[in-house]
Amino acid sequence: MSSTITKVAARTESLRKVYGEGDASVEALRGVTLEFAAAGFTAIMGPSGSGKSTLLHCLAGLDTPTEGHVFIGDVDITTLSERLLTQLRRDKIGFVFQAYNLIPTLTAGENITLPLDIAGRDVDRAWFDEVVDTTGLRDRLSHKPTELSGGQQQRVAGARALVSRPEIVFADEPTGNLDSRSSDELLTFLRGAVTDHGQTIVMVTHDARAASYADRAVFLGDGQVVDEMQAPTAERILDRLKSLEV
Amino acid sequence: MLRATVKSLLARKLRLVLTALAIVLGVGFTAGTFVLTDTALKSFDDLFGQVYANTDVVVQAHQAFNPTEGGGGGGGGGQELNPIPERLLPSVRAVPGVRFAEGSVQSFAQIVDPATGKTIQSGGAPTIGSSWSPDLSPFTLEPGGAPPVGPHEVVIDAGTAGDHHLTVGQQVRVVTPAASDEYTISGFVRFGSSNSLLGASFAIFDLPTAQRLFQREGTFDFIYVQGDGSSTPEQLAARIAGVLPHGFDAITGTSAASQQQDQVNQGLGFLRTGLLVFGFVALFVGAFIIFNTFNIVVTQRSRELALFRALGAMRRQVMTSVLVEAAVVGLVASVIGVLVGIVLAIGLKALVAAVGLKLPPTALVIAPRTVLVSLVLGTTITVAAAVSPARRASRVAPIEALRESTAPSSSIRRRVIVGTLVTVVGVGSLAVGLFGGVSNAGYLVGLGAALTFVGVAMLSPLIARPIASTLGRPFRGRIAGKLGGENANRNPRRTASTAAALMIGLGLVTFVAVFAASLKSSVTAVLDRTLRSDLMLTASQFSPFSPQLARGLSSSPDFSAVSPLRQGAEAKVGSSTTFPVGIDPATITEVASIEMDAGSITGLSEPNTVAVSRTEADGKHLAVGGTLRMQFARTGSRRLTVVGIFEPNALLNDYAVSLGTYDANVAQQLDSTVFLKYATGVDQATARANLEALVARDYPSVEVNDQAQTKATYVKQVDQFFAIVYVLLILSVLISAFGIVNTLGLSIYERIRELGLLRAVGMSRRQVKRMIRVEAVIIAVLGALLGLVVGILFGWAMQRALSSVGIDRLAIPFAQLVFMLIVAALIGLLAAIWPARRAAKLNVLEAISYE
C-alpha cells in the first residue's frame, strides 16, 4: 500500500462482511485492507456485486463488518456504540447519496446546515458562504428541493456534506441519476473541495468518467481489492474494467 | 383482483389491526349496550314473573294513566293509587274460586345504617316499605329468619342486609311516614333468586304495623288474590271485578307483572338510548379514522393501483377492490366488536351499578338482533367511510405507474363548496332541532351535530396549515421540533382529518363542559335571586320525607316561616307530562321571591286553582281566570282555574298548586323540601344546632342546608352526573388517539427514506422521537382547538335553546378548557410513543436503500 507520510483519514483492516448464514451466506467482502489519505479523492470501482457499496457502508458506520476494523482518524468505529456511531456520522462524516438526499420540508439552505442543526452547532458563516458560492446555488437557498433540478439537488447534498467540515465525505454513486452536464458540475464541485480545501472524499461509482476526477481509483472484484491506479483517466479505467470483467 | 385485495390486506397486518380497532371499540360499545339492556330486561322479566308467581289477580284502584318509572322520585314505589277500603277484602274473599286474598300496603321506609347513623340508599334507588303477606308473599324468606310479627319487628331485603352487615336479631332504626323508630330484624328476604330489586332497600312489617306506619289505617293499596285452580286468572279477575265498586280494577297477576315490566322497559329504554348515543359517536369517530387510513393507503398504493390499471383492470374493479378490503376489515372488526361488547356489558353493568342501578344476576342475553345490528352497523360504516378513498383510487391513471407521483386529489374548490354546504345544512338542522319546536328534535340535533362535524372536518384543511404553523412555532428552535412541525404541515388534509377525529370527541367534551357550567351558573344565580329562606331541609337524592317534620317545626319559636314544598307526582296537561309542585301559598312568599307576571300566588289558597309559568302559559295560551285540565294518575282529569302566571324560576316547575290541591290528587303526600326562616331575635346558631339534633334523631335522611350549602350540593350533583358523561366520551377520544397512531405510522412508512437520511447524517434516535412527538402534539392540539370552537358553539346554541326553561346564562369554563388542551397535548404524546419508537428503531441502511 502507499508508503507516503501523508496523514491517513480512514483505513480498513482485513474487513470481512458476510450476509446470511450457512449455505445461503454470501461473502460480500473478503478481507479488504485499504488506506485513504487525508485530502485525497478516492474512487472505488468495480462491477455489480463486487462489494463496493458494502465497503462504503462499512466505512461510513452504516453497516457493521463481520470481521476486521474500520478507523476514521484514530477511532476504531467497529467498537462504537450506536449512540457514539451516530455522533461520529454527525460530526466527522459527510454523505452524498445517489438520490433522496434532501429533506423535502426544508429549504436548500436549511438542508445544507442540517447536520449542524442536528448537532446544535453554530454555522460558520464564512465557510457556509464559500461552500454555497462554489455550488453556484446562492439564489436558490430559499427554495424547496422540489423546486430544484436533479443536478442542483445533488450539489445541495454536496454542500451539506462539506459544511460541517467532516474528516471524510462518502459519496455513493452521486452522479447515478444525473445527466452528463449535471454530473460534471457536481464532480467539479467535489474535486474543488479536495484541491482547494483539503477535503477527503471517498466515492463509489461505476462510471469511468466520474472516477477520472479522483486522485486514485481502487478496483474491487469479488469482495477483494484487485487493483488500484493513481491519477486515473477515463480511458485507462475503462481498459482496466474490461480486463476485470473478462 | 380479489386475490390482490386479500394479499394487500395481509401484507399490512399492523395497519389492519389499528384501523379495525376504531371499529371494534365503537361496535363493542353498541353491542355492549344492547347486551346490557337486554340482560336487564330479561332479568326483570324473570323477577316479576317470580314475584307474581303466587298471585293470580291483583285488585287496585283505577289509574287514569300509568306513570313512568322513577316519576315518584323514590319513596313508595312510585304508585299513584287511591287506597282500597279494608271492607272490600271480605267480598273479594267470598268470590267463588278464590283460595287466598290478602291486603297489602306500600310506602317509603328508610333504613338507618346502625354503623354510620345515615340512611341507607344506594344511588337513586328507592327505599321501599311494604306489608308482609303470609300466604301470597312475593318475597322469599331466607333460612334462619321469621316473618315480622307485631309492632317491633321488621324484615329487610337480603341485598341491603348483606351490603351493610345487618344480622337477624339486630336493632335497626327505620323512618316511615308516621314514625322514626327502632325495630328488631326478624329475617331477610330475597326476590325470586335475586337478593336485591334494582338496588332498592326494603323494610317489611306485618300488615297492621305497616298500615299504621304508612298512614293507611283501614285501607290497602293492593289486594293480592290466589285462585283455587277451578278457573283461569282471567275468569277469576272478571268475577272479582263484578263485586268491586266503581274506581277499582281487578287485573291478572300476569298483566300486573307486564304493567311493571312496561315501566322498567321505559326506564331501560332511556338508558339504552343514552348509551347508544355514545356508541354511535364512537362509530362516527371510527368512520373518520377509516376514511383517513384508506385515503393514505390509496396514496401510498397509487403506483400499484396504476399498474393494475395499466394491466387492464377497469376503474370499477379498482374501486371494488378497495371497497371489498373495507368490507372485510369492517366485518372482521365488527365480529371482534361484538365479542368485546359482551365483555364490555359486564363492565357497563358495574358502571350502572355504581350509580345505584343494581341489576339482578342473570346470564348475559345475546339477542340475534344485537349481533345483526352490530355487524351491519360496523360493516356499513366502514364501507361508507371507504367510498371516497375508493373513488380516488379508481381515478388513478395507468400512466401513474410510470411516474413518480401521488394519487389525484379532488380540487380544493369543490371541497370548499361541499364542506360549506354540509356545514350550513348541519347548523341549520341543529338550529331547527333546538329552536324550531319540532317533534323529532333529538334526531335533528344529532344529525345536525354530525353534519356540522363533517363539514368542519372538510373545511379544516384550509386552516390547518396556518394553525399548525403557529402551533409548531414554539418547537422551531431545535431541528427535531422544526422538522416535526414541518411534517405536520406537509399534508394539511391528512393532518386535518386526523385532527378531526379528535375534534369530535373533544368537541363533545367541550359542549358538555360549557353546558354544565351554564347550567350550574344559571341555577345558582336563580337560587340567589329566588331564595329568601335561611335554611332548607332536603332529603338525600331528592327522596321525599314525612310532613310530620314541617308540622312539628311550624310551632317552633325559632322559625318565623316554615314552608313545605311537594313534588314528584307525574301529571299530564294535554299530551305532555309535567311534574306539578305543591306549595303553601300563605308562606311561600316569605321564603322565596316569586316574580309574578299576572295574578298572584296567594290566589292558590282557593281550591282547584293553579299558577302557571310564563313559558308554559305562552305555549298553551293560558291567562289568569282561564281554566286548564290536568290529569292525575290517581284522580284523573281535574279542571283547575289559573290564578297567576309567574316568571320561570328554580322552585316551581311549570305548574304550582296549593298543598291542599296537591294532596287531593296525589297519593304520595310527602315533602321534598322545607324552607325555613329564622324568627327575629333568635340565636341562629343555637336554633340550627337544635334543628340538626332533631333531624339527626328522627329524620336521618334529611339534610339541613343554608343557601351556600344548597348551591354547593346542587353543583356537586350536576358535577357527578356529568362526570359519567365524560367517562362515556373518553371512548371516542381514545379511538381518535388510535387515529393519530395510525396516521403517524403510515406517514413514517411513507417517509422511510427521509428518516434513513436523517439518521445517516447524524440525527440521534432521541431527536427522531422528538420529531414524531412534535408532529403528534400539533395534530392533537389542532383537533382540540377545532373541538373547542365547535363545542363552545354547540354549548352556546344549547344554552340559548334552553334559556326559556331557566338556563339563561352562558358560562365558559376557561380553566377546564385549558386543561383539556393540555390533556389533548398529552394524548398526542401518548399516541406518538409507538410510531416514534418504530421510527427510531429503523435500520438506517435498509431505510436509505429502500425503494
Image (tube, rainbow, N blue to C red):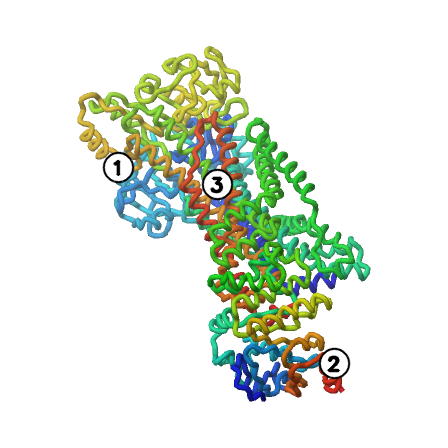
Q: Which chain contains the residue that carries disc 1?
A: B
- Do callouts 3 and 1 point to residues on the same chain? yes
Give the alpha-carbon distance from disc 3 to disc 1, as whole Å: 49 Å
**From the viewer's perspective, is the residue at label 3 or at label 1 nearer?**
3
Q: Which residue is mark 2?
A: A235
- Give the residue type that dot 2 points to: Glu
For label 2, count other residues whose C-alpha is less than 10 Å away and answer few (under 14), some (14-19) or many (20+).
few
The C terminus of chain B: image quadrant: bottom right
Above or below, comparing residue B534 to residue B725 in the picture: above
| Residue identified by numbered label 1 | B181
Mark 3 crowd level (few <14, some 14–19, many ≥20, 10 Å Cα):
many
| SS of the residue under disc 2 | helix
CA separation in Å, label 3 and label 2: 75 Å
Q: Quadrant of residue A146?
A: bottom right
Badge 3 is on which residue?
B510
Q: Chain of mark 2?
A: A
At x 33%, y 25%, the residue is B531
Position of residue B636 in the picture relative to residue B110 (left or right): right
Q: Residue furthest top?
A: B625
Q: Is residue B255 left or right of residue B389?
A: left
x and y, in percent, of residue B444 in the image: 60, 34
